[in-house]
Amino acid sequence: MSGCPFHDGAQANPAAPLHDRSSNSEPATQAPGATQAPGATQAPGATQAPGATQAPGAAKADTRAAAPQSETQNELACPVSHRHRSEETHRPIAVVTGASQGIGHAIVRKFYDHGWKVYTLARTPFSSVCPWAEGMTQHISVDLSDEASVRIAVDVLKEQLGDRPLNALVNNAGISPKNEQGLRLDATETDLSTYERVMMVNVFAPLLLTRGLLEPLQQGKGAVVNVSSIAGSRIHPFAGAAYAMSKSALSAMTRELAFELGRKGVRVNSVAPGEIETAILSAGTDKIVQTQVPMNRIGNPKEVADVVMFLCSEAASYVNGSEIQIDGGQHIGS
Ligand SMILES: NC(=O)c1ccc[n+]([C@@H]2O[C@H](COP(=O)([O-])OP(=O)(O)OC[C@H]3O[C@@H](n4cnc5c(N)ncnc54)[C@H](OP(=O)(O)O)[C@@H]3O)[C@@H](O)[C@H]2O)c1
């Protein structure tokens, strides 16, 4: 896939398998510098990311240098590139969960392409086979089904952000468990532990991340985008009861948080994708697309990433508490 931050740049490896569905279940090798939260896939050699936290003195030095002299004069007088550091200081920062594949991967790519600094979260350690320029020091391995792991990831993120603001949090990671035949889990056949796991990953982890990162989000006048689903508002033949209930709750949580945080300068919105081409889809999706989607085609992860980017941008500065359907018209019924 061209233009992908995981494949572009000096370290790019065109044969890297991150987009290959079959490779997605295989945890990649932990890259040096990536951070691991307990409960996530074990990664030998994982350490706190060096250099991710901005040295407090660096920003001050930029401010002082900018005042009395032109940038060119500074460059002549000083061997350190102030331009680079001031660009670095002003880059907006995003945190994206479920970044290892599918829609999350496309979101990371979109933000990265637009000059954002992106902190990525997933269980899969960051790939040393398929790295991108800053990815190694900005990936945090976390198991969102484990509350302790999520809390530690919040602490790690806050430490890495230092006193920098956070401009966007994209709660994208989600799970949709099936029964042994690979079919939807009905409400009466889903055991309580499955409900709990789905609610933890799909609802409570986004809540803990939003709450835990509220201060830097407020500082950045940031935006939160929760990735819900068409299954949150109607019966879906494959999605299952626990998944549907969790997405419905996520949409309600979006509304509640938008109400609470709007006055603090943080906007909270959600997107509700329909049938998007990723590993989460079940066999038979083609038939749904033919019969239920007015546009008569499946969606691309990039088309979700575009809307998420919009919701995090200035262009959406008065959009709060909204849910945007990204489903080719599937929600209007056939
Ligand atoms: N594709 C669709 O048609 C569609 C439709 C409606 C809504 N959605 C929603 O869109 C979001 C992304 O879906 P997708 O299709 O891109 O799914 P996907 O390809 O299955 O990717 C799911 C992502 O979530 C991460 N994840 C899963 N469990 C996790 C855990 N316990 N801890 C940390 N990370 C975890 C995975 O990373 P690791 O495995 O590396 O941990 C992966 O990056 C989900 O919320 C999904 O419900 C998708």
Image (spheres, rainbow, N blue to C red):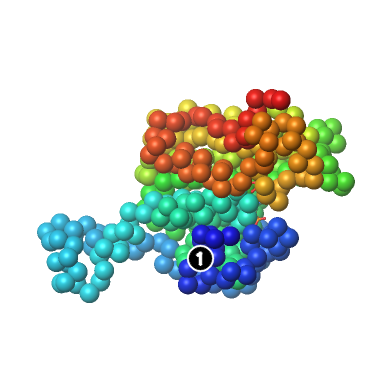
Q: Would residue 315 be visible to someone looking at this image? A: yes
Name the one closer to the observer, 222 or 60.
222
Name the side, left or right, on which 31 lies relative to 186: left
Q: Which residue is mark 1?
A: 8
- For the N terminus, the quadrant is bottom right
* Percent position of residue 304, x then y: 56, 43
Name the one closer to the observer, 309 or 58.
309
- For the C terminus, the quadrant is top right
Q: Is residue 305 above or below residue 128?
A: above
Q: Secondary structure at mark 1?
A: loop
Name the side, left or right, on which 83 lies relative to 234: left
Name the one closer to the observer, 211 or 134.
134
The picture quadrant where one finds residue 115 is bottom left
Name the one closer to the observer, 89 or 309.
309
Name the side, left or right, on which 15 lies relative to 198: left
Q: Is mark 1 within 8 Å of ligand 1?
A: no
Mark 1, other Cα within 10 Å: few <14 / some 14–19 / many ≥20: some
* Residue depicted at 82% across the width and 34% down the height: 186
Dot 1 amino acid type? Asp
Q: Would residue 158 be visible to someone looking at this image? A: no
Q: Residue furthest left?
A: 68
* Percent position of residue 184, x then y: 81, 39
* Percent position of residue 85, x then y: 30, 63
Name the side, left or right, on which 78 lies relative to 148: left
Q: Is residue 327 above or below residue 120?
A: above
* Percent position of residue 83, x then y: 26, 63
* Residue depicted at 67% across the width and 49% down the height: 278
Count up the numbered dots: 1
* Residue depicted at 58% across the width and 69% down the height: 14
* Residue depicted at 47% across the width and 72% down the height: 10
